[in-house]
Amino acid sequence: MESRQAEAILQCQRDFFRTGATLPVPFRLDALDRLYRAVSARQPEICAALKEDLGKSETESFMCEIGMVLSEISYMRRHIRRFSRPKTVHTPLAQFPSHSFTQSVPYGNTLIMSPWNYPFLLSMEPLVDAVAAGNTAILKPSAYAPATAEIMKSLVEECYPSEFVTVVTGGRQENSVLLEQKFDLIFFTGSQAVGKEVLRRAAEHLTPAVLELGGKSPCIVDASADIALAAKRIVFGKFLNCGQTCVAPDYILCHSSVKEQLIAELKKQITTQFGPEPLKNPDYGKIINRKHFDRLCSLMDPEKVVLGGEADASACRIAPTLLSDVTPDDPIMGQEIFGPLLPILTFERFDEVVSFVEAGGKPLAAYLFSRDAEQIRQFRTRLPFGGGCVNDTIIHLATSEMGFGGVGESGMGAYHGKAGFDAFSHKKSIVDKKIWLDLPMRYQPYTSRLYQFLLHLFLK
């Protein structure tokens, strides 16, 4: 794609937005209805694409991608009228007589850049929020998941004219050309390194950006935890999508007194959930490409592997792998893993956990397995992270009733449900001042003592 092509696409969307066609709620509802029907009808094709790109099973594809998109559409259809209405707020006495309210309006022309690990969900869910808020959108999916990108392009073309929503496929060249344009909002999901570049390019046009990034999300297991249940839920969250989940537990911090018991239960759960030979399990996914496969293999220290470690380079598959006796200085602790490797570290006091997590920046997610009310309180209030769970993993992002997003290095802004509508909306503050009375206190000359008294009274 050349710059003039991107300019032409964006100009068509600008012209369409300026007609006001996207503003009426019935238009938005119709757009959501069309998308819901298309996604429902083409589920088999979407599942096949996800299988080709990431080795996902049909069950996982629906549970973690298709179903969540349909759920977001349904949520927006139920609430969009309420979200779009003006919201009355208190009016100070000094502004009498008037009516004060906020009004959510779309930003306008938006760019959505999505990653490869959940290529359908992390493209279509922000698109749902953008459409519900009344924007146009250019969707740029990752080139690393080409099959899913193609089915999304076909699906969007079936639902919408290109001046409303369009999909641009391709790689870095297309990303760079699109980021040269002046959008009204950029929504990016991906790595911290690319997120920095997106924010830098957005700043050139003073374009607001929502960044959904990542980080090393800790999973803390204290001495009071239900170890068997903790292991079951950690294995589910860590090895879902072959570990390629932005909110997967990146590493375990467990109390030294329960380390051996936890490792034993983790081994048991990996065998229970994936079988004695996970690489032969057809429902266990694969690493997205050889580059990431090689990176993950380089992070495995054979002397610290206590389970797993098997790899199939021809299929880009790595078995669920546990590593014990890991130290903060090991290479695996120097970057977000984003794969099926789970290092285990220990602690003695909870204060050590707080210091360790704080030293590593602000992760996208954090998890605590505990029955200790005080440690749960400290986890909620002292640890810096975007979102998380107590006694479970990853499920905090599976509801439209809570916003999902990072903080600090792990991102800025949030979406899902109402938070998603707000992310793609500008909230105007408006005072509707009445004309049947005009109080004189604010006008010069400020000479009357009565005026000064009344002004003081009104502004008090």
Image (cartoon, rainbow, N blue to C red):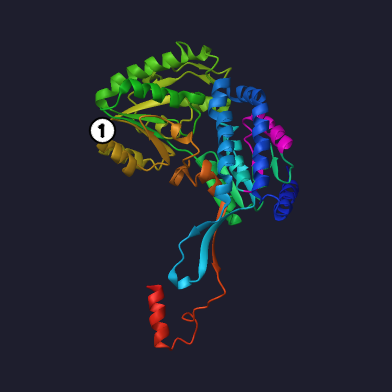
Tell me the residue at 63%/44% (across/down): 131
**Residue 171 seen:** no
The residue positioned farthest toward the bottom in the image shown? 447
What are the residue bounds of the magenta stretch? Answer: 134-159
> Which quarter shows the N terminus?
top right
* Pointer 1 local density, CA inside 10 Å: few below 14, some 14–19, many at least 20: few
The image position of residue 448, as x and y in percent, is 42, 88
The image position of residue 135, as x and y in percent, is 64, 48
Residue 456 found in image quarter: bottom left
Amino acid identity at mark 1? Asp
Side of 327 relative to 287 (left or right): left
- Of residues 307 and 112, the one nearer the viewer is 112
Side of 429 relative to 231 (left or right): right
Side of 451 relative to 185 (left or right): left
The image position of residue 173, as x and y in percent, is 67, 41
Side of 147 relative to 345 (left or right): right
Q: Is residue 332 above or below residue 137?
A: above
Tell me the residue at 49%/85% (across/down): 444
Callout 1: SS? loop
Residue 392 highlighted magenta (yes or no) = no
- Of residues 402 and 350, the one nearer the viewer is 402
The residue indicated by pointer 1 is 372
